[in-house]
Amino acid sequence: MKRIIIVDNESSFRKGLRTILENIGNADYIEEASNGQEFLKMLLRKDFDLVFIDLKMPIMDGIEATKKARAIYPDLTIIAFSSYENEHYRNLMLEAGADEYLSKMNNNYDALSDIMNSSGKFAQRKYLSHI
């Protein structure tokens, strides 16, 4: 069972992704954070093994939060989820330590199913947006 946190400043996106993940199943619990700073505080209070994180957020963006989370929790699976279909941003998130970069503009149900049903750390990078 996955212990998940969704990090995005848009509450409607968080709720929608949460519903999809709950429908796929294999989630022990799903928490939400609205920015990178809130996410890092939550990591200190509860165990997570899977993160879906947006790129652009107020207070602390996904790039900085991913770098900090990766430094502290190297086994954490971090999936970047962004509406920026731009190679530059994709590379920034991957260099920061994201395991995968998914576009919010695509139908990602198959990718989400694979991620949710994988055992251990998901690091295939087979769903990287073709930009």
Image (cartoon, rainbow, N blue to C red):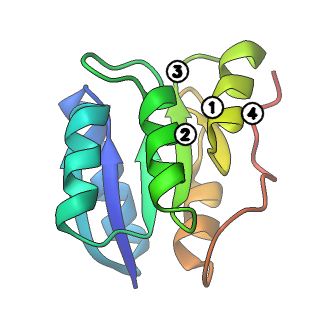
Q: Residue at x 25, y 34 (%)?
A: 37
* Residue wearing tag 1: 93
The residue under label 1 is which amino acid type? Answer: Met
Q: Marks 2 and 1, Cα distance to the nearest angstrom?
A: 7 Å
Going from N to C along the chain, the mark reached first, 2 or 1, is 2
Counting residues from the start of the chain, the first of labels 4 and 3 encountered is: 3
Q: Tell me the mark number nearer the camera, choosing from 1 and 3.
A: 1
Pointer 4: what residue?
129
Tag 4 secondary structure: loop
Q: Secondary structure at mark 1?
A: helix
Mark closer to the chain start, 4 or 1: 1
Contact check, label 2 and label 3, Cβ < 8 Å:
no
Q: Earlier in the sequence, mark 2 or mark 4?
A: 2
- The residue at the point 41 percent across, 81 percent down is 26
At mark 3, the secondary structure is loop
Where residue 96 sits, quadrant-wise, is top right
Q: Are marks 2 and 1 in contact (CB under 8 Å)?
A: yes
**Dot 2: within a 10 Å radius of its alpha carbon, few (fewer than 14), some, or many (20 or more) residues?**
many
Disc nearer the start of the sequence (1/3): 3
Residues at marks 2 and 4, CA–CA distance in whole angstroms = 11 Å
How many discs mark residues in the rendered view?
A: 4
Q: Nearer the viewer, residue 22 or 93?
A: 93
* Residue 66 position (above or below residue 49): above
Task: Give the labeled residue for mark 2.
Answer: 80
Residue 23: x percent and y percent?
35, 68
| Kind of residue indicated by mark 4 | Ser
**The N terminus: image quadrant:** bottom left
Q: Are marks 4 and 1 in contact (CB under 8 Å)?
A: no
Q: Which residue is mark 3?
A: 83
Q: CA distance from mark 4 to mark 3?
A: 11 Å
Nearer to us of marks 4 and 1 is: 1
Q: Residue at x 31, y 56 (%)?
A: 5
